[in-house]
Image (spheres, rainbow, N blue to C red):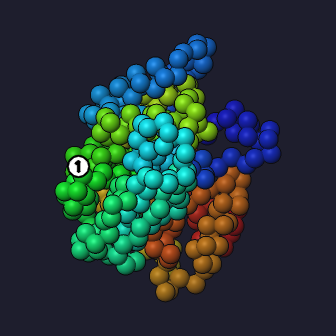
Amino acid sequence: MTEDSAEVYRALGVRPALNVSGTTTAYGGTKLRPEAMEAMNRAAGTLVDIHELNARAGEAIAEVVGAEAAFVSSGAAGGLVLQAAAVMAGKDPAKMAHLPNTAGMRDEIIIQNCQRFAYDQAYRAAGAKLVGIGEGRRCHLWQLEAAYTERTAAVAYLISPFYSRRALTLAEVVESAHARDIPVIVDAASTLPPRANLRSALDQGADMVILSGGKGVRGPQGAGMLLGRKDLIEAAAANASPNQFLGRGMKVAKEEIVGLVAALRIFVGEDEEAETRRYREMCQRVVDALIEVPGVEAGVRHDRIDYLIPTATLRFTPEWDGPPPGEIFDAMAGGDPRIYLHTLGNPDELGVDPMNVDDDELDLVIRRLAEALTGLHA
């Protein structure tokens, strides 16, 4: 962070933060690319027809990704609402105007119970009724096959770190749903990088995929990329702002649309191997500084499933006799600046995701962590 940027928040009585938890929106998301901010500032001085901007920006994003069509949504959660609206109401204005009342529509969205997540409320906000299948940790194909009814509008699928690997695969779900002409809608919001995930779900046959436009892309945090079948993307756009239907309140500013396109073009052109090496080197600095702390196993995790970029992890073993991980997290978050650690893995684990910090900021994280681990809370 810079002193100038931190002062903007301090003037409001808000402490600035270092986010090494990943790309968590609650902790600020990620740092916006300067090039995206420049594009947004330039766009702010001119007015345009938002329908035209939505269409042309969608075409630009689809071309970059290699998708059939695209639409800029109000974050990934807004994209989920539009997914549900698109598969239930399509482009029929009479149905669109009735949402979230779904009387007379196909309104059931099947979802594996082991993939239930906080944001599936976005589907319900559009009026969808979620039909859970399987157990808490796994699902069988026969359970999906038995769940289809004449009211099935779609099958939802979650691709996210730290969810069950014993769920039905996306390929299995696509094959089953498409045999009945039922679309598959995917939430893959938090899966970039690697950049291959821009197309991964589409290549497996998904009909609509939502990805964050902030997070790893480092575009505007309030923007999402809805990708997929042209007819469904058109239906999502019809339900979205500036049209006066369900998505009207989930508007995306013209500056954010322009900023996302600029950020995405830069993102796809970057050297991912060099980026990964740098992240790994940063993580190794954390490990080297803390590896001798008794009762703590320090290492670097990177498995392209849960730890999508190299992440320094601290696992607290039974030999650890210091404060519990939750207290360490709170101590780090309570300092100035606040430091938010990665907590998505094992409950006995804390981590440092390097995406959002520079070298000087990482040094501060390491110093504060060492103090917290030895009981010298900052």
Tell me the quadrant of the picture where the C terminus can be found: bottom right
Q: Please tell me which residue is depicted at 41% across the width and 67% down the height of the picture.
A: 131
Residue corresponding to mark 1: 205
Query: Which of these two is toward me, 161 or 14?
Result: 161
* As drawn, 116 above or below 75: below
* As drawn, 104 above or below 42: below
Q: How many dots with numbers?
A: 1
Kind of residue sitting beneath label 1: Gly
375 lies left or right of 341: right
Query: Which of these two is toward me, 56 or 220?
Result: 56
Residue 179 locus on image (x, y percent): 19, 56
Q: Please tell me which residue is depicted at 79% across the width and 41% down the height of the picture.
A: 12
**Residue 230 visible in the displayed image:** yes
The extreme top residue here reads 46
Residue 217 locus on image (x, y percent): 43, 39
15 lies left or right of 350: right
Q: Secondary structure at mark 1?
A: loop
Residue 65 locus on image (x, y percent): 30, 34
Mark 1 crowdedness (10 Å alpha carbons): few <14, some 14-19, many ≥20: some
Residue 172 locus on image (x, y percent): 21, 62
The extreme front residue here reads 104
203 lies left or right of 119: left
**Residue 77 visible in the displayed image:** no
In the rendered image, which quarter is residue 1 located in?
top right
Q: Please tell me which residue is depicted at 39% across the width and 28% down the height of the picture.
A: 58
* As drawn, 365 above or below 323: above
The extreme bottom residue here reads 318
Query: Which of these two is toward me, 291 or 56?
Result: 56
Q: Please tell me which residue is depicted at 67% across the width and 35% down the height of the picture.
A: 5
